[in-house]
Amino acid sequence: MKHNLDELLEIVYRYYPRGVGIADDVDEQLRHETEEHARLVAARIQASKDERWHAMRRRIGERFPGMLTDQSLHLHGGGCDGCYSFTINLPQPAGRTLWFEVSFLAPYYIIHSPRTIEIVKDLRDAFSISFRGMLFIVSRSPLDPRLISNPDHERRRTVTITRDYVSFDLAPDEQPYADWIAHEIEASFGCERMPPEVGTVLVPGVATNLRIPGEVRLYDCLFSDSHTWVKPSPSEVPAPRAKVDESSLTDRFVAVLTVLRAHHQIGWTLRWPAMVRRLPESERQSAAVFLSASTDGFLHKDKMLEELARMRAHDESPATLRAMAAKRELEALVASWDGEGEPPTSMVAWASSFLDSWLVDSDSAAPS
């Protein structure tokens, strides 16, 4: 190795700011405004112009006609990765893809191929349900008779999960391609292969496009964060939730979800204009809406009143004014409820009528 670990971390910190925009959530905008990120973007653009890369890619393409795919077309715009990346699609019967990545931030390269692991997990005592265009995550058992009308106690309680990761231990039929191309890489760039015990070391205090702090490895920074560099351990893979169909819900739970759906629609409509204003200008037109919420399957009067009290108009659009009027109506219905048992019929009827009229117009369902 040309560098020790401290030197490699020093290289990483030239291009990835430490501790910026990661106090609570990862703030991409703050990271992208740093000197380090500007340096990374400049390095990508400069790398895209390097004739060594283009010449080597041509030679490999001639040696393996029709098998090479350039994965670095984004570099000229300054986006993604700290490496040149290309794949070789192996002929049948192997039919696998061999990945080659050459860092332009440090003098190293790597070669790997995809693998898949199957993990059998017990389902969690929680489930998800899609209801009136919103995904609800329910922290109750999918066998709870208060929520599910016909719970199937005999149904399968385990599921097989597949996870993709990369392997640096190449198969015998992959090795000849790797050897020839490795020689080309070393001759073109004067670099050496980075071993996994170095590349998989965690990097403190930084985030990447696809990795949050605590998950970022040297490979993510010096090469690409689009791969899983370490074989997943079954203990690290979270147990999945069951998915329940709306037709399986009890009437009581349908009533609860109806009120919650109306409540969240009002809140989302009021917050949306301010959320859009916080986005970079380039992202505002393409901002997508994905509605989701969590519930324990019951309505809680105090919590609903507290959340309704926090809602306030963020702009004077007709959609916001309409939502404010609906908020006041729902607030009055919740305040008059004794808070015991399922929601009263009047509240459910109001929520259902509100949703029927509101969701007719898809633009109202996703305000902009």
Image (cartoon, rainbow, N blue to C red):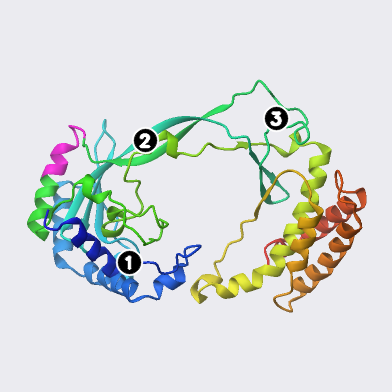
Q: Nearer the viewer, residue 61 or 308?
A: 308
Circles 3 and 2, Cβ within 8 Å, touching? The answer is no
Q: Nearer the viewer, residue 70 or 318?
A: 318
Label 1 residue SS: loop
Q: As drawn, is 360 to the left or to the right of 366?
A: right
Q: As drawn, is 236 to the left or to the right of 78?
A: right
Per the image, the residue denoted by label 2 is 116
Q: Amino acid at mark 2?
A: Thr
Per the image, the residue denoted by label 1 is 16
Label 1 and label 2: CA atoms lie apart by: 30 Å
Q: As drawn, is 274 to the left or to the right of 87?
A: right
Question: What residue is at 59 percent from the left and 71 percent from the top?
Answer: 276
The part of the chain drawn in magenta is 171-179
Q: Amino acid at mark 1?
A: Tyr
Q: Is residue 39 positioned above or below 192 on the image?
A: below
Q: Is residue 141 positioned above or below 364 on the image?
A: above
First of labels 3, 2 by sequence position: 2
- Magenta segment: does it hold 355? no
Residue 368: tell me if it is visible.
no
Please rate how many residues cluster around mark 2, counting C-alpha atoms within 10 Å: few if below 14, some from 14 to 19, many from 20: few
Q: Amino acid at mark 3?
A: Leu
Q: Quadrant of the C terminus?
A: bottom right
How many labels sit on residues? 3
Per the image, the residue denoted by label 3 is 143
Q: Nearer the viewer, residue 248 or 106?
A: 106
Circles 1 and 3, Cβ within 8 Å, touching? The answer is no
Of circles 1 and 2, which is in front? 1
Label 3 residue SS: loop
Question: What residue is at 77 percent from the left and 31 percent from the top?
Answer: 145
